[in-house]
Image (cartoon, coloured by chain):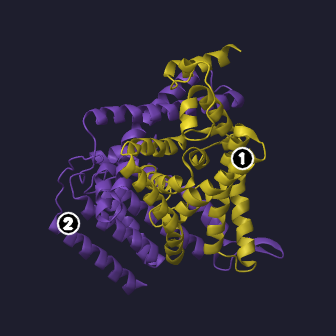
Chain colours: A purple, B yellow
Amino acid sequence: MSGLAIDDAAWGSAWRTRSPADKLLLSVGLVVGALVLPVWPGTLLVGLAAVALALGPARVPARTFGRAVRLPLAFIAIGAVTAVVEVGGGGLGWAPDAAARAGALVGHGLAGSAAVLLLATTTPMSDLLPELRRLRVPAAVVEVASVVYRLLFVLLTSLTTIREAQTARMGHSTVRRSYRSSGVLAAAVLTRSWDRARRLQDGLAGRGMETGLRVLPEALPSSRPFVAATVAGLAALVAVTLAVA
Amino acid sequence: MHIAEGFLPPVHAVGWTIAAAPFVVHGARAVGKEVRERPESTLLLGAAGAFTFVLSAIKLPSVTGSSSHPTGTGAGAILFRPPVMALLGTVVLLFQALLLAHGGLTTLGANAFSFAVVGPWAGYAAYRLTRRCGGGLLGGVFAGMAVADLATYITTALQLALAFPDTESGLAGAAAKFLGVFAVTQIPLAIGEGLLGVLLFRVLTVNARPELERLGVLTPTPVLEPEKARVLEPEKARGTDDEEGQR
């Protein structure tokens, strides 16, 4: 399950203890850069910066990062090719500047994905969600999202276990059986999620839950040098791009 | 199928975010109100979100040999209503972007519009319409889940067509292109998801009848064997599978 791979990388990253706000500033800066800067050399530099920072100082395993970058590639490739094929009177053909346009789309897509992954592979969701409170997302929404994060691994484990049991009993041997098993699997996971929620609720009610789920957030102080380097780096990126383009 | 990060031009990314915002904010208000009145719903809503996320990890065998992932928003809309799904779907999209590298941050608005707004509403409308016309629960579920999936895919294709119109044939040509390319995987997937929904709800009506009645999916009927209406335990899930194996 690749979701666990990215999450594992986030927990094991050398940047795990950095302030989520600092990492958010860096990644969002790169994401915006990947989107608005001209593709040459802007997005190339953004992509290189994201990969270098993730594999270098953040020490994200290259295998995990490489696999994760590959995931959106199918969509980017199909989407880019479709965008530059023309439907005219004489059937299908290439758009006038097809190669350049497709290249630009792939560049923006890959650099943007790498920049998002830099955040995803260095910051666990449980650090990121309290940060949403500062962006004025309602507390109730952040709490629901935190419960989603805490429950989904339990449910993914259930899913894997049940599917393994089904496969061992020939539950996925034919397409027909596979559909049947998938339906049972989805039902089992859904009823288990309700069961989990009810048990958590009982436990919390017994401890007097009145004002929502209050957890003690880990103190991850912001680093001035990191923020200064981020701002300087992003400014340099924009300057170089504008100078070359 | 979500639009990848960086794929939409900035104007479109901002535009779709603005388009999706009212629905998501409305959903957030609904959730906030629910949680203030009944703090215990936080956990049930979280469970619903986690289920929607996990449902996309169930691989459906496809006729063409490859396997596809269901979107799951149709089931969510039937069980929890579309306004709640607008918010839960957006939360799930954020999780998919950051945990599965599927979708993106600047395209979150566009994806939320197709996946969390249009899909659930279209699916829910199809579900209600089918049930009103006498299609029954399972017929409604099939229509709801298949339509939610199809509507999401058509919206995504139109979003891409708007962003990249054809130089010669314009918007219509671009829409035909994107609809055609993604139809190969999305139409079998929509049918597959409808079938999965039927199988899912067939199990739920046996194993989780009280929950379905509480959510208003089924009208309460006198239950003959209350001990049957319990949460599906793993032994029972395997039991069903065993029966299948022996047949």
Question: Looking at the picture, how far across and down is residue A9, in whole percent?
Answer: 33, 46
Q: Position of residue B175 (x, y in %)?
A: 71, 68
Q: Chain for mark 2? A: A
Label 1 packing within 10 angstroms: few (<14), some (14-19), many (20+): many
Is residue A57 in sight in this rendering? Answer: yes
Front-most of residues A59 and B95: B95
**Residue at the outermost top position:** B246
Instruction: Say whether marks 2 and 1 touch (CB < 8 Å).
Output: no
For the residue pair B4 and A183, the one nearer the viewer reads as A183
Task: Give the left or right position of residue B244, taking residue B91 as reference.
Answer: right
- Chain letter of the residue beneath label 1 in the structure image: B
- Badge 2 marks a residue whose secondary structure is helix
**Distance of label 2 from label 1 (alpha carbons):** 52 Å
Report the amino acid beneath label 1.
Ala
Rendered location of residue B109, percent (x, y): 50, 65
Q: Amino acid at mark 2?
A: Phe
Indicate left or right for A157 with B209 as reference.
left
The residue beneath circle 2 is A226
**Residue in the image at 68% along x and 80% along y:** A96
Q: Nearer the viewer, residue A143 or B137?
A: B137
Q: What residue do we see at 39% from left, 74% from top? A: A33
Q: In the image, is residue B4 above or below residue B133?
A: below
Image height of B227 relative to B82, above or below: above
Residue B185 visible at all: no
Residue pictured at 60% horizontal, 44% vertical: B75
Image height of A97 relative to B179, above or below = below
Residue A151 found in image quarter = top left
Quick one: SS at disc 1?
helix
Callout 2 and callout 1 share a chain:
no
Q: Is residue B24 above or below residue A184?
A: below
Residue picked out by circle 1: B143
Instruction: Report the quarter where the C terminus of chain A lies.
Output: bottom left
